[in-house]
Amino acid sequence: MAESKGAGPVALIDTDPQGSLSSWWNKRQADTPLCATVDIAKLSDHLKEIKNAGIKLAIINTPPAVTDIIAKVLAEADLVLIPTRPSPHDLRAVWSTAELVQAAGKRMVFVINGAVPRARITAAVAIALSQHGTVAPVTIFQRTDLAASMIDGRTVQEIDATSRSAEEIEKIWITYLRNYVNYNHYSCADCAV
């Protein structure tokens, strides 16, 4: 999204040992965004190098579980997006991450994703999350085009820029991310780009 809106160049950094962001990027046909490999112990130095190379936005994907990696990424992050599925299990799991973000004094936004249209639990989860921080005013619903974008390294905007999924992602961009461009670091706890 950022690249298509003229906010690039963008670098993706995958610190999740699962490597799902890197796997997505390796299937990608497009040259952008860039994918950077970093030594987490030297994250600050790597981010400076990336900035000096002209990157305007770094998106850092972290593991879903609370680890030392998350603490190191939080030290560098300007904004933390916490994607949360509307389920009791995910809701319980997100609190420890939210506590770390709050303790680090970083701005955080919960993004409800993988929601089923018209499911009552989505509203209940949004209310619960709002007790602990900002909840994005747009929900990312589980749709085939969003899942399909993970298969071959495309974004949902590249599959169909007029789809509802593309609109939802664009609303997240407009509401939270575009104002941070000109080299900032976003930590995305277990997020997919």
Image (tube, grey):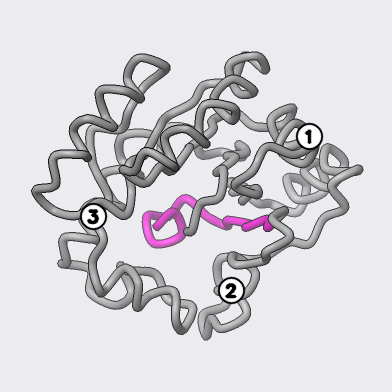
Q: Are marks 3 and 1 in contact (CB under 8 Å)?
A: no
The amino acid at mark 3 is Phe
Look at the numbered disc 1 and give the secondary structure of its residue. Answer: helix
Q: Which mark is residue 35?
A: none
Which stretch did the figure color magenta?
1-14
Q: Vertically, is 2 above or below 28?
A: above
Residue 148 left/right relative to 17 = left
- Circle 3 sits in a helix, a strand or a loop, which is it? strand
Q: Magenta span: helix, strand or loop, mainly?
A: loop
Which one is earlier in the sequence, the residue at label 2 or at label 1? 2
Name the residue type under label 2: Trp
Camera-nearest label, 2 or 1:
1
Q: Tell me the kind of residue under disc 1.
A: Lys
Q: Kindly identify which residue carries mark 3.
A: 141
Looking at the image, which residue is at 37% across and 38% down?
88
Mark found first going from the N terminus, 3 or 1: 1
Q: Residue at x 52, y 55 (%)?
A: 8
Q: What distance separates the C-alpha of mark 3 from that of mark 1?
A: 30 Å
Q: Callout 2 environment at 10 Å: few (<14), some (14 to 19), or many (20+)?
A: many
Q: CA distance from mark 2 to mark 1?
A: 23 Å
Disc number at residue 25? 2
Q: Which mark is residue 72?
A: 1
Residue under the image location 90 percent in, 43 percent down? 42
**Residue 151's image quarter?**
bottom left
Q: Nearer the viewer, residue 101 or 88?
A: 88
* Position of residue 178 measured from the top left corner of the image (x, y, whole percent): 41, 39
- Judge whether residue 107 is colored magenta: no
Tell me where residue 103 appears, x and y as whole percent. Answer: 65, 14
Structural distance between the alpha carbons of marks 3 and 2:
22 Å
Position of 136 compared to 9: left or right? left
